[in-house]
Image: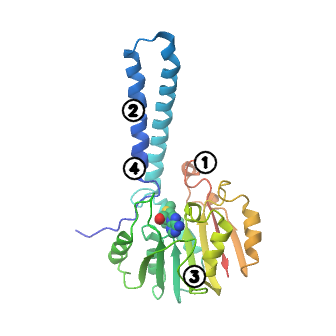
Amino acid sequence: MKEKPDYSNWIPVKFVALLGSAGVIFAASFFASFLLSGGAAVLPVRAVLAAAAVLCLAFCFYMAHARTLLSYDGGGVQGKVLDNVLAHLGWNGVGTLIDIGCGSGAMAIKAAKKYPNAWVVGVDYWGFGWDYSKKQCERNAGIEKVGRRVVFQKGDAAALDFPDARFDAAVSNFVFHEVKSQPDKLALIREALRVVKPGGLFSFGDVFFAKSHYKDIDVLIEALSGDVSEIHFVDTRKSDFMPKYLKTPFGPGGQMGLIYGVK
Ligand SMILES: C[S@@+](CC[C@H](N)C(=O)[O-])C[C@H]1O[C@@H](n2cnc3c(N)ncnc32)[C@H](O)[C@@H]1O
């Protein structure tokens, strides 16, 4: 049987399972509370348990369906988001590209397939919170027959282990908001741009509308415009490949944008 790549899902199955388990435990505790005597004193506890069970189970069903829409075997939205990042890069594929926070290797491998003469470097810290690994990336690249032109290495997006102007192009998706080692997202994007050659290209997707990470996207673009020769912003939420279902405040599509341009 032909081996299949494993690109994983932005909504880890263990997160959905955790929500489901919490919902079942709250529901079971709610029903168990009827076995207790305690009169009116039990009522507020019962109300809290019922509300917690409903919330957890509703959120679990929402996330399970969102997961299916994102998945490569289901709605395929994850792959379309990455295609969109690469589509805005506008690169001729000559030279070397870096994918910062490459996760399971999906975009680095897509780039290697799209640009058959390019060299690609995927960097990720493969740390706590995600089930991705370097081994998974290398296995995926091998199955996709681009292993010879793609290398994966461990590194921190906040302090990239490369000299200035090392790359002809840089991409990243859904990573900057995750980088705990650099809460200042402007400094983090500047670090990504540092390794791009003058005249090189960049395309970075992230939750640019999330106020908890980016206060004001216009201010961010304004600040970056002094560092690059061209910069543009795309509201990914308006893309036709993004289903309404994923554009809620809880869905991964609800706050997505893309900055791209020329250094
Ligand atoms: C939502 S995943 C996105 C993965 C991939 N870019 C994609 O779009 O499928 C976030 C990724 O950021 C990586 N990450 C988080 N903090 C990082 C850091 N400080 N340096 C490098 N990668 C980091 C995680 O390991 C994870 O792979």
**Label 2 amino acid?**
Ile
Q: Cα distance, mark 1 to mark 2?
A: 26 Å
**What residue lies at 77% left-to-right and 70% top-to-bottom?**
222
Relative side of 79 to 239, left or right: left
What residue is pinned by disc 1? 249
Q: Cα distance, mark 3 to mark 4?
A: 34 Å
**What residue lies at 55% left-to-right and 50% top-to-bottom?**
251
Q: Residues within 10 Å of mark 1 (few under 14, many from 20)?
A: few
- The scheme the figure's colours follow is rainbow
First in sequence, mark 3 or 4: give its number: 4
Contact between labelled residues 2 and 1, with CB atoms less than 8 Å apart: no
Contact between labelled residues 4 and 3, with CB atoms less than 8 Å apart: no
| Residue 64, placed above or below residue 124 | above
User: Could you say where residue 90 lies in the image, as x and y percent from the top left?
Assistant: 60, 80
**Label 3 amino acid?**
Ala
Residue 183's label in the rendered image is: none
What residue is pinned by disc 4? 14
First in sequence, mark 1 or 2: give its number: 2
Q: Cα distance, mark 2 to mark 3?
A: 49 Å
First in sequence, mark 4 or 1: give its number: 4
Q: Cα distance, mark 1 to mark 3?
A: 31 Å
Identify which residue, 250 or 152, lies in the foreground. Answer: 152
Relative side of 134 to 201, left or right: left
What residue is pinned by disc 3? 169
What residue is pinned by disc 2? 25
Quadrant location of the N terminus?
bottom left
Is disc 2 placed on a helix, strand or loop?
helix
Is disc 1 placed on a helix, strand or loop?
loop
Relative side of 161 to 13, left or right: right
**Label 1 amino acid?**
Pro
